[in-house]
Image (cartoon, helix red, strand yellow):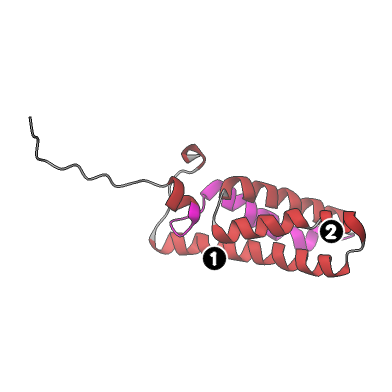
Amino acid sequence: MRRLFSTFAPGAPGVGLLLLRLACATVLLAHAGAALQRAQGFFGVALQVPAAVLGVLLVAGLWTPVAAILAALDALAVGFSIPAGYRFWLLPAVVAAALALLGPGAWSLDAKLFGWKRVEIDGSVNI
């Protein structure tokens, strides 16, 4: 999984990536929540569950590159399925694509699970 990330940016860039993840996830979760309230039947609900799951993964920063690519595809699919919807959904799709390319940042579960580890080796040798 480490090969999917170039780095886990700390400091201000990491905060910027956290804000991007939260913004993209907010759009996905708000749309999924509103659509679930209107949805009728199994297929109406089944189409919105992936968007909600992707939003939760982006908030947590878990499997960020994969979740972001799927979120971008979901945003494009929703945007082009609604007349003139691409005007709104193009920005979340671009933000999700940028997240897929940049990675999750230091404040994510990906950084905790797959980030660089510090190993301290004791200098004493007992032979």
Q: Residues within 10 Å of mark 1 (few under 14, many from 20)?
A: few
Vertical placement of 70 versus 26: above or below? above
Residue 70 drawn at (x, y percent):
69, 47
For discs 1 and 2, the disc positioned in front in the rendered view: 2
Which numbered tag is attached to residue 19? 1
Residue at 69% of width from left, 59% of height from top? Answer: 92
As drawn, is 44 to the left or to the right of 57?
Answer: right
Residue at 62% of width from left, 66% of height from top? Answer: 23
Q: How many marks?
A: 2
Which numbered tag is attached to residue 59? none
Three-letter amino acid code at disc 2? Val
Residue 94 drawn at (x, y percent):
66, 54
Tags 1 and 2 in contact by the CB under 8 Å rule?
Answer: no
As drawn, is 121 to the left or to the right of 30?
Answer: left
Q: Within the image, what quadrant is residue 53 found in? A: bottom right
Name the secondary structure under disc 1.
helix
Give the residues in magenta: 83-109
As drawn, is 90 to the left or to the right of 13?
Answer: right
Q: Within the image, what quadrant is residue 54 found in? A: bottom right
Comparing 55 with 100, the one in front is 55
Residue at 41% of width from left, 47% of height from top? Answer: 115
Residue at 57% of width from left, 50% of height from top? Answer: 64
Q: Which residue is mark 2?
A: 45
Residue 20 drawn at (x, y percent):
57, 62
Three-letter amino acid code at disc 1? Leu
Q: Is residue 86 magenta?
A: yes
- Magenta: main secondary structure equals helix
Name the secondary structure under disc 2.
helix
